[in-house]
Amino acid sequence: MFKQLQQDLEADHHIHFDNIKLLEEALTQANYINEHPGYTGNDYQRLEFLGDAVMQQSTAVYLFKRFPNWDEGRLTELRISMVQTRAFAALSRELHLDRYVQLGRGEELSGARNRDSLLEDLWEAFIGALFLDQGQETVMQFLEDIMFVKIDEGFYDQFIDYKSKLQEYLQRDGSVKITYNKLDEQAVSNNEQIFTVQVAVDNEPLATGTGKSTKDAEKRAARKAYQSLMND
Amino acid sequence: MFKQLQQDLEADHHIHFDNIKLLEEALTQANYINEHPGYTGNDYQRLEFLGDAVMQQSTAVYLFKRFPNWDEGRLTELRISMVQTRAFAALSRELHLDRYVQLGRGEELSGARNRDSLLEDLWEAFIGALFLDQGQETVMQFLEDIMFVKIDEGFYDQFIDYKSKLQEYLQRDGSVKITYNKLDEQAVSNNEQIFTVQVAVDNEPLATGTGKSTKDAEKRAARKAYQSLMND
């Protein structure tokens, strides 16, 4: 089974894994071992401890070098949106780690295989294993290809509450009036509409956003407004 | 001034720093820059962001390799006692970073130069600068010499509450009676006494500890009892 994963990692991500036992350890949960006395390795928890720290440093180093003009507040904010449960779970699914994990029967029945918190642990354990097997540079290259590239696609924006951030920023020196006004609403198919919303502060327009719900359109308007204010 | 620090680092710690501007950045606080318009660099905060993550990974990698038989709970516990304010402040003082930091006038007057929270930031910024200037391997070697060596000296034990840990462990399956009994009290000089305390669970002796106060002796007894139970 892990031979297949090893081959897929090579074919899809140019990741060569030497020690297949390490790959198996990263994908084996403690209760699986209790139920399989023949299994001789460890569970994934030590590798998770290691991978958690490797993810912190790799992400910090990348952001530090990529954004030389950002202050530590912006760097921290983006890092927090990247190094967290839902982002790691999405990466685990992208690598199909959910298909390979060896779980105890109880975890399997309770649906752990699709649970974000388990998939987060697996991602960290996988990165810990890759770090031991291939070293820091390979981890960094892999993360650039699969994870850091998503910064420019706006992938991590979904984990940031831009409406709160915009409000916090605009009210830093006292109360102001922030309004979201629907400018447009267009049917694009029988079941789908596109909304356009404008955000304004004290009746001064800041930015507009579009989305399939007014809530989505408001969030995008807030993000555009916040990011353009930050880049002034 | 930073030339002196550069020389001391070389002489005392075999650390060669190429870019002295980076060393200065690591030791310059934001308000100092506001008050010195001639200063052209950044304050230490970006380097602190970087160094914080480098400390996390370096410590995790070291502990993972050094203690191959420890589970992630023990690894995490030791890491937490190492990667924290008081430990980092002590390292900053050992390098005399407190003498070199360039502070704003307000911070100086409020005593920031001796404040643990500032010294923690400086340690992280210094490690961030060293990482950029000399790379991961030099950082790792330096941390082994100055920081990891203190594990065996028991330096980080002072940051762990062993009496609580022992109680938690002994009461994991229900209530037990834990007692600390003074066995001995000896005068070693006019102003100094040495106390010996025994810790027992349900009247079974577990370990003894000595110290200059009963509180100290109790803490040492708790540590010895806890560590020997963990190593069973």
Image (tube, coloured by chain):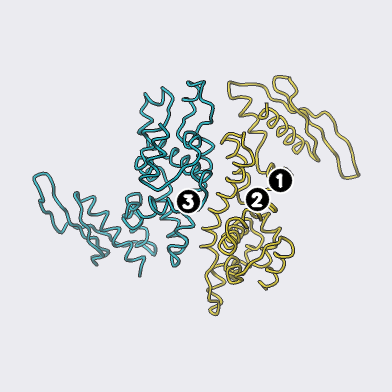
Chain colours: A cyan, B yellow
Q: Using the image, tell me which numbered label, if any, was put on residue A97.
A: none
Residue B54 appears left or right of A186: right
Q: Quadrant of residue A177?
A: bottom left
Question: Disc 3 vs disc 2: Cβ atoms closer than 8 Å?
Answer: no
**Disc 3 residue type (three-letter):** Thr
Give residue A128's position: percent from left, percent from top.
Answer: 50, 43
Q: Which chain carries label 1?
A: B
Q: Distance between the residues labelled 3 and 2?
A: 32 Å
Give residue B92's position: percent from left, percent from top.
Answer: 66, 58
Dot 2 lies on which element? helix
Q: In which quarter of the image is residue A219?
A: bottom left
Q: Tell me the quarter of the image containing the N terminus of chain B.
A: bottom right
Label 3 or label 2, whichever lies nearer to me, is: 3
Dot 1 lies on which element? helix
Q: Mark 1 points at which residue?
A: B155
Tell me if mark 3 has few (under 14), some (14-19) or many (20+) residues whose alpha carbon lies within 10 angstroms of its own. Answer: some
Give residue A230's position: percent from left, percent from top.
Answer: 36, 65
Q: Residue at x 58, y 59 (%)?
A: B135
